[in-house]
Amino acid sequence: MLMNHKNSKKFVKENSKLLNNISKQNNRNDFLLDNLISNLYLHLCNLVPEKIAFSAAINSRDTFKYFLEYSVENTKLVLNCNNNNWSLCYKVYPSYLYDQDKYKDNANISHVDSIVVYLNDFFTKNAKKYYH
């Protein structure tokens, strides 16, 4: 199929508008993600060593990105300390598999040296700061 010069300019113009909209959206999401990670890092610095807080915050980026692109799911970040060795564990309770009653029964962590951060609550509280 051949395009004449007039149609090709229109096509390029429409595509560039679409690309600009996509890049603006990506910039907004990146701004929000960066701020959420920074807020999580600052929050965790009060609870765990700085290196662990940094690792947990960076590794939570994909979770926050999923929340932005799809939906907010019940997600816990569990930080365990065993003899000064830290481990991170993400527990996800997708809404299509679990109802609220099952999630509430599963909410308690019995390990003594565990810190639990509910990422879904953290996300909703902190995202409100950046959306007016």
Image (cartoon, rainbow, N blue to C red):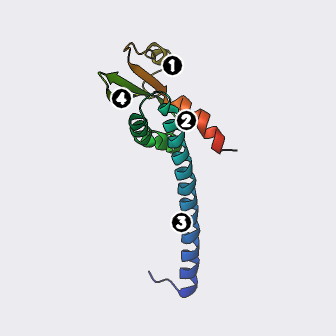
Q: Earlier in the sequence, mark 2 or mark 3?
A: 3
Q: Which residue is mark 4?
A: 89
How far apart marks 1 and 4 lie (CA) works out to 21 Å
Residue 2: x %, y % from top left = 46, 83
**Residue toward you, 19 or 65:** 65
**Residue toward you, 119 or 112:** 112
Question: Furthest residue to the right?
Answer: 132
Frontmost of labels 2 and 3 is: 2
Frontmost of labels 1 and 4 is: 4
Q: Are the residues at dot 1 and dot 3 in contact (C-beta closer than 8 Å)? A: no
Residue 35: x %, y % from top left = 55, 45
Q: Which residue is mark 1?
A: 100
Q: Is residue 64 visible?
A: yes
**Residue toward you, 2 or 93:** 93
- Which residue occupies 50% across, 39% down? 67
How far apart marks 2 and 4 lie (CA) works out to 17 Å
Secondary structure, mark 1, is helix
Q: Which residue is mark 3?
A: 19
Secondary structure, mark 2, is helix
Amino acid carrying label 2: it is Phe
Q: Are the residues at dot 1 and dot 4 in contact (C-beta closer than 8 Å)? A: no
Amino acid carrying label 1: it is Gln
Binning the other alpha carbons within 10 Å of mark 3 as few (below 14), some (14 to 19) or many (20 upward) gives few
**Image vertical order of residue 18 relative to residue 122, above or below:** below
Residue 20: x %, y % from top left = 57, 65
Frontmost of labels 2 and 1 is: 2
Secondary structure, mark 3, is helix
Amino acid carrying label 4: it is Cys
